[in-house]
Image (spheres, rainbow, N blue to C red):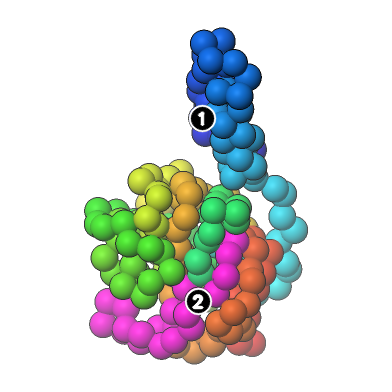
């Protein structure tokens, strides 16, 4: 469980108690229901990270876009993952390596499944340099999200599948792979952070 979940749930439980005290149990029930949902939303299950030279999904959700794009003037594969309110929102490192880039960009809060959200929404861009390839991913806020959490800094070493951050409530993650590393997923696939393989490195 992410610590934030306990904080929000405790506040909602107190709100429910006050409402129940002044208006009866029926008045407290909505707050208690929300407290239970918040605990569910901020769950943080353990994951079995696959072995081998792979790039794993940094987030749970549905693949909504796979295409070739330009990133900083270079060609790349982009894999976009939409996280609904019912998905785990803990983010994980897509590969082992060192964080070489970290850039926060304020922005709008469009629906995260819309393509323009990749450019216009609040986002945090992370670049990880692995032993063989460099992978970039973006934590992108959605219409309900107002806070992106990233717990690492430039120069930190991360391991494949390691917890690195969180996007609160509905959101999106874009992963950018080198052009020589084609995605192993297609639009419509469901992926799980730290477990699902997005791409395999060529031998």
Residue at image location 40% in from the left, 50% down from the top: 144
As helix, strand or loop, the secondary structure at mark 2 comes to strand
Q: Position of residue 72 (x, y in %)?
A: 27, 77
Q: Nearer the viewer, residue 194 or 11?
A: 11
Query: Does residue 75 show up magenta in the picture?
Result: yes
Q: Residue 21 lies in what quarter of the image? A: top right
Q: Nearer the viewer, residue 6 or 165?
A: 6
Residue under pointer 2: 64
Q: Quadrant of the N terminus?
A: top right
Q: Position of residue 107 (x, y in %)?
A: 24, 57
Part of the protein shown in magenta: 59-80
- Residue 8's tag is 1
Whole-angstrom CA distance, mark 1 to mark 2, is 30 Å
Q: Is residue 73 visible?
A: yes
As helix, strand or loop, the secondary structure at mark 1 comes to helix
* 147 relative to 95 in the view: left or right: left
Residue at image location 64% in from the left, 42% down from the top: 40
Query: CB atoms at circles 1 and 2 under 8 Å apart?
Result: no
């Amino acid at each position: 469980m992410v610590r934030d979940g306990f904080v929000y749930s405790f506040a909602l439980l107190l709100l429910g108690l006050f409402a129940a005290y002044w208006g009866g149990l029926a008045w407290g029930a909505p707050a208690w229901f929300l407290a239970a949902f918040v605990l569910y939303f901020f769950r943080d299950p353990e994951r079995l990270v696959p072995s081998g030279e792979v790039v794993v999904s940094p987030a749970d959700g549905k693949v909504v876009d796979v295409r070739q794009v330009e990133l900083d003037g270079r060609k790349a594969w982009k894999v976009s993952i939409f996280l609904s309110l019912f998905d785990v929102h803990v983010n994980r490192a897509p590969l082992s390596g060192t964080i070489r880039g970290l850039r926060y960009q304020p922005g709008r809060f469009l629906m995260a499944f819309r393509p323009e959200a990749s450019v216009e929404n609040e986002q945090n861009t992370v670049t990880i340099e692995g032993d063989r390839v460099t992978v970039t991913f973006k934590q992108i806020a959605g219409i309900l999200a107002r806070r992106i959490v990233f717990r690492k800094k430039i120069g930190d070493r991360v391991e494949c599948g390691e917890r690195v951050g969180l996007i609160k409530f509905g959101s999106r993650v874009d992963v950018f792979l080198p052009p020589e590393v084609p995605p192993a997923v297609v639009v419509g696939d469901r992926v799980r952070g730290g477990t699902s393989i997005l791409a395999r490195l060529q031998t």
